[in-house]
Amino acid sequence: MAGILKPPGAFAVTPHKVSVCILIQMYAPPAMMSVPFPFSSVAQHNRFGLYLFALTKSCDDIMEPKLDELINQLREIGDVLYQWLTDQLISRLSSLSSPDDLFNLFSDLRAILGGADLSAVDDEQVVLDPNSNLGMFVRRCLLAFNLLCFEGVCHLLTSIGIYCKEALSSCSAYELPCLDDSSNELEALSEYENMDLENIVFEKVNKEIEARKKASEEVSFHLHAPKALFGLVEDIKVSAVSKSQGGDKCREASPSAHAPNDAMREFDSISGAFLRTNWQMQGYLMEQADAIEKHGSSFSLNAFELILRQLQKLAPELHRVHFLRYLNSLYHDDYFAALENLHRYFDYSAGTEGFDFAQPSIGCNSFGRYEIALLCLGMMHFHFGHPKQALDVLTEAVCLSQQHSNDTCLAYTLAAISNLLSEIGISTTTGILGSSYSPITSIGTTLSVQQQLFVLLKESFRRAESLKLKRLVAANHLAMAKFDLTHVQRPLLSFGPKTAMRLRTCPTNVCKELRLASHLISDFVSESSTMTTDGAFSTSWLKNLQKPMGSLVLTQENVSGKDSNAFQFCAQPSSIPGSVLQLVGSSYLLRATAWEAYGSAPLTRVNTLIYATCFSDGSSLSDVALAHMKLIQHLAVFKGYKEAFSALKIAEEKFLSVSKSRILLLKLQLLHERSLHRGHLKLAQKVCDELGVMASSVTGVDMDLKTEASLRHARTLLAANQFSEAAAVAHSLFCMCYKFNLQVENASVLLLLAEIHKKSGNAVLGIPYALASLSFCQLLNLDLLKASATLTLAELWLSFGPNHAKMASNLIQQALPLILGHGGLELRARAFIAEAKCLLSDPSFSVSQNPEAVLDPLRQASEELQVLEYHELAAEAFYLIAIVSDKLGRLAEREEAAALFKEHVLALENENRQDEVDPLPSTP
């Protein structure tokens, strides 16, 4: 949630701003025609101007770069231009040896600004528009310098000397030759410092602030412990080129832990040079909040906690510190610390700081904003997997939001309840929502969870749209798309005339909602949010200067020396807020999920790649992990396990420290699939046990994970020929899915029951389950799963004997186009084998007349099954090839197929022999 940032404080001239002014002088020297020296082209001059624009917009950031960091940024411009700019910058800074030099510098700055009438200026003359971003920055610097007293000018001069001295101490002599003489100038500058003018300036500032505090009871600067606080803020370094420090005491032991944006360092004697405003401190805390939400548990816990504790001690009125401590504890799964800090935050701030909700009606302010506290508490319970507690708290938040006429909080609370009902399985909400929320009670009938979810989504969308909360509107579009993807909309009323309804999901509605959600990127600027981070874009732009252009296509090693002076703009971030990018990225991730359900593998892969390429930098690690998970699953299904495990190894290194990582779940899924294909049932059962632990209610209720664990356990029992136990587990799973309205999972479980009866020899019992699965697939438009169910139905008909081969062949021909176009290796191989069996079972088909009609699909199936290491099906394919080759008299091909058949059978027997020592348990 966006924080309320106070108006910016006074604009102060600092050594960094003086450096920027000098660079602007080089960019637009007075009375210079065409492209000024030393720029070789207009494009190079424009790129330098864009760099200056980023510098000026980031000057209000919480931390300013030091001189050596500024020089490192200039290095990105190019070797020749970098050397000239660096020499000029250091030379001019070191020449500032007296207050008169500063006065002359700022007097010269006025000459680079154009006059009121720019139409009279020559087209090729370089003139700085006073109303441009660079011109406004220069004017602000001029105004701030003119407001300085003589003591302030002397203090600025001393700070510039220290600013240069620090760069000299951190850079080698050959890198900064012009700074050799600057150390001598410090002795002259010390004369001004010995006048003890700094204490006079601080004393005046303190008196002025005390007067303002008495008048308005608000403090715009935090001065409880000036030097310590200044040291804390000044020593929190935002480096433009981040370098990992191996000996940093504040970093976590894990190599993948993400340290706070600003690392704690020891205080020094010059740390109290410049004040930091409340606005800047709030901006810093908001930046860290975004980092915590993005990196989750990989964010360094102890280092940031140390910073927050000192900020809380030195500036108690910064109540948002408690909220940051709450977020830090929340994403590190510390329930008690998160609950304590959340209570502290709302106890101190009463919910009036750090949220961009609309103000409640007059008369309710004295009660604070308790409904927002309840909303946060409900979301915390949701995060820790406590659905009942979360629903109780959020329901109370709905009541208070209605009582206090806080429509914005009500809209967000309804969205949170909708997300809760869709993400976590709750079988009934009777007596919870039905007695508290008027849109539900007004219907006058008992609604199912699905119908309540639909009503809540519609109401939340209506309120968000009326309040012009663009981001919440986009989030509701995504929620509606997800609802339409997996639910069939039924009439809410159980009486009265009913119009004819087509009880099927509508992919058109899903695509429509996803398209409307992505429109947010074009109109996000119209949202009425009080959060303004003017320099956030430029700061991130500067921090990304070192990133190569097209990280996977063009690396630093591939760039030639002559092109090294070019800026790498393609990798630079856009000015779109991070929350907007997250929502737009989520729409592409949901697109991939939708196409995965509908059965289009190419569109699933394309949308996932778009998300991973364009939106991964601004998204949370869990969403990025989900994108990697989809891509690796695609590799496993279409390329085999060797390619998938190679990609998984890279993903594991990237998401090593993410708690409850999807990558760990993916690893278990791949291990289970490969174990079943190889016939290693003991390992498959161990993997099922691990999945059962992950699905335990101790760590929170996750219905998808519970369904996954039970489904794989039943498949393991089926592979071990324990048919009755497998059927019992599958039946129990179907009852659970029906109870929680998991319709997509119902289709998969019914298909599994059909597979169990097919393999056990009870084809008659298996056909009803296959037909029921087909009905669910048609209802939900699950095209690929429908093709798989059709193939299973054909295999069931084929098991009845040759008389039903024609029926089975017709079913296979119906499903074959979709299977060949979008099916994976296993599904394609099954279809090929079933097609060959149908031909061999058909009395009217002669193998001798058309042998390739049988051998071609069998060869294709054997190749794909060998890639998957699926021993059982591969042995069956080679057995059929050997039989057909023997009938045709192709002895060489028969012997080769027989040898491969024997190889796969022996491999399967070896795995089974190992599992005989430790048989599978018969209970789930």
Image (tube, rainbow, N blue to C red):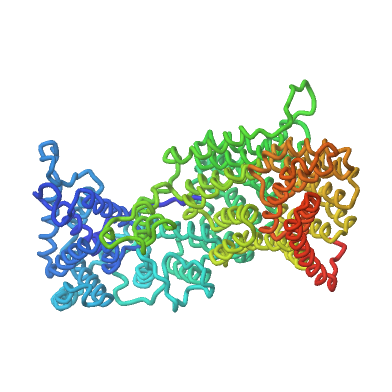
Q: Position of residue 135 (x, y in %)?
A: 21, 48
| 812 on left or right of 3 | right
Residue depicted at x 85% and y 71%: 916
Is 698 or 366 nearer to us in this picture? 698
Is 697 or 346 nearer to us in this picture? 697
Q: Quadrant of the C terminus?
A: bottom right
Residue 67 visible: yes
Question: In the rendered image, which quarter is residue 792 located in?
Answer: top right
| 343 on left or right of 807 | left
Q: Position of residue 605 (x, y in %)?
A: 57, 48
Q: Judge whether 297 appears above or below 715 on screen.
A: below
Q: Judge whether 823 appears above or below 300 on screen.
A: above
Residue 203 visible: no
Q: Judge whether 42 appears above or below 233 on screen.
A: above
So how many labels did they put on this image? 0
Q: Position of residue 306 (x, y in %)?
A: 48, 71
